[in-house]
Structure formats: structure tokens, C-alpha cells
Amino acid sequence: MKKILATLATLTLAAAAQAYPDKPISIVVPFAAGGPTDKVARDLAVALSKHLKGQSIVIDNVGGAGGTLGAAKVAKAAPDGYTLLVHHIGMATSPALYRKMPYDTLGDFEYLGMINDVPMTLVGRSTLPANTFPELVKWLESNKGKINLANAGLGAASHLCGLLFQQSVKIDMTTVPYKGTAPAMTDLLGGQVDIMCDQTTNTSGQIEAGKVKAFAVTSPKRLTTPALAKLPTLDESGMKGFNVGIWHGMYAPKGTPKAVQEQLNAALRAALKDADFVKKQEALGAVVMTDARTGQAEHKKFVEAEIAKWGPVIKAAGQYAD
Ligand code: ASP
């Protein structure tokens, strides 16, 4: 009897996997619409759908608390392959930034593979009197106590980058949290906040159009995207060793059937080779992943390494949220 039940269960799972997906899939983006994580997820959804029987993929923006609210929603969702998460480096930095986490980063998700690497830029409102990085530092020094630094909440990439920047420049700033860097960018464009660190996928268009001032890139090497190539690195600007790079990955709730996970990983790998997706990403300064990190086990291993890397750095910076 036990054997028959086990065989039946295996057959049911196999049938479910074969039918998958037979209804729309929802991808939770843990930040506001129109921002960099949202842009990656929306472009990816188009490419991904082609390899998932053309099923529609709907983006569900659940911003707030630096990405932890959206990630928590997916951690608690039914593990059936119809609720997925696209998240960035915050998967690895939030556990150190929050005293209490609403989910277990390594225990509550299936790792489906990584998507891209995206550099960050330090940008400021167009009305700032500074035009170069040294001029920005002078302006910051003479405006202590009055500087507003926008971010997407504690745990976000912009928070991490801003935190390390304040530490390097040795000036404390007032952080203004948003549900994502799309609304933060709106306020930067309107001059309500002064500076922000954000992915090139959100800043390159505004930099090119001259709507924000760009002071530096946070990667250890200068970028090759023409509009950004002239920007110095923070490392070469005197902030030795400054290196914050964003990566994105895709996740499903723990317990999603293995066959469905494998289908999603195969679809993801195929989407990462989609010429249209690659072209769009490259134009925004992002590098689509082609290495081993697109594998499920390698993705999880990489996040584990990132948790180990950022934990001590964040603890040394002494910033926590409850
Ligand atoms: N760039 C944001 C961050 O700071 C997230 C977003 O809005 O996509 O983490």
C-alpha cells in the first residue's frame, strides 16, 4: 500500500510539473514600480514567458522595509511555482541590517538562479553647486547636518551604499527612506533630497539627460558604458577599497516541487540568452550573468558567501533596524 501511495504521489507531482505553468505567474518585486529592480524583473518577465509556454507573468510590487516585506510575502506564499521573487543584494545584507527578520534567507526559499550584475553610481540633484567628486566632498563638509541622503529603506542596496559612503567620507547624513529608488529618484529630480546611490539601471538615463549630477561609480573599475565611462571610481577618488556591486537573483518559496524549480531554472537560463533582454540590460550598464551562478546550487552558495562578506562590514558600521 505504502509503495502504491508513493508511486501515486510521484505521478501526481510529475503530472503537476508537466502541466506547469497553466495559469499566470506572479513575480514579486520588493521595491516600487519603475525602479531598477522592477525594470530588471519586467524585462526578464518578457523573456522568461517565452520559455514558460507563453504564460503571462505579472509583476507584483511590494515595496517597503528595504525589500524585506516583499521577500516575506514570497517566503509565506504557496510553494507551487506561481509566486516568485526577484530580489537583489538585499537578500544577503538584510539579515545583518535587521535584528529581527520576517523570514529565513537561506531556509525559506528555493534558489532558482542569478540574473545580472549591476554597478551603482553616486548621484545628486541637478541644483547642487558641486560638479565633481572633490567638489561634492567640499559641499558635504560645509553642509554638515543639512544633507539628505535618499534610499530605499534599511536593507536596500542604496542604504548599504549610502552607509559605507558616510563611513568613508566621515560625515553623517539624514537618510530619507522610500519604498524603492523610483520614488526616491522623483524627489531627487525635484530637489527635495540631495544625493543617492543607485543602480545604473535607474540612473544612466537621468545622467545622460543631465537631470541629475553623477559624481562616481561604486565599482572598483570604471564602467565601459559610453555615458558613464568618464565617471571616476570612489576607490580612485580616495575611498580606498570602496566596492559595492548589485546582483539580482530569482527565488521561489521553500518546498516548490523540484521539477518546477528545474523548469524555472531552465527558463531563466534561456531568458538570459535572449538577445532583446541582453541588449536592454547592456544599454543600462548591467551585465547579464553567463557564469555558474545561473545554477541553483551556485546561486545559493554565492548568497551564503555574500552574507558572510557583508555581515561584518555592516556590523562594523553599527547600523541596525528592528
Ligand atoms: N535600488 C533600490 C535599492 O536601493 C531598489 C529598487 O528600487 O529597485 O535597493
Image: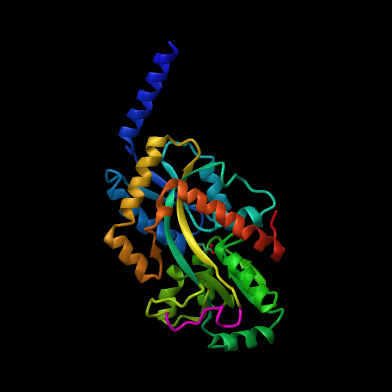
Depth check: give the residue in front, 111 or 27. Answer: 111
Q: Residue at x 35, y 24 (%)?
A: 11
Depth check: give the residue in front, 315 or 43. Answer: 315
Q: Give the side of residue 225 with respect to residue 273, left or right.
A: right
In the rendered structure, which segment of residues is drawn in magenta? 229-239
**Which of the colour schemes (rainbow, by chain, secondary structure, one colour) is used?**
rainbow
Is 246 located above or below residue 295 in the figure? below
Task: State the predominant SS element of the stretch in magenta.
Answer: loop
| Location of residue 122 (image quadrant) | bottom right
Query: Residue 259 location in percent, x, y?
Result: 37, 36
Q: Residue at x 47, y 51 (%)?
A: 299
Q: Give the side of residue 55 with respect to residue 122, left or right.
A: left
Outermost top residue: 1
Residue 234: in magenta span:
yes
Q: Residue at x 60, y 59 (%)?
A: 309
Q: Residue at x 58, y 76 (%)?
A: 195
Residue 247: in magenta span:
no
Query: Residue 27 location in percent, x, y?
Result: 43, 49
| Location of residue 154 (image quadrant) | bottom right
Asked if residue 35 can be seen in this view, the reply is: no
Query: Residue 96 location in percent, x, y?
Result: 65, 55
What quarter of the picture does the N terminus occupy?
top left
Query: Residue 105 location in percent, x, y?
Result: 57, 47
Q: How many marks?
A: 0
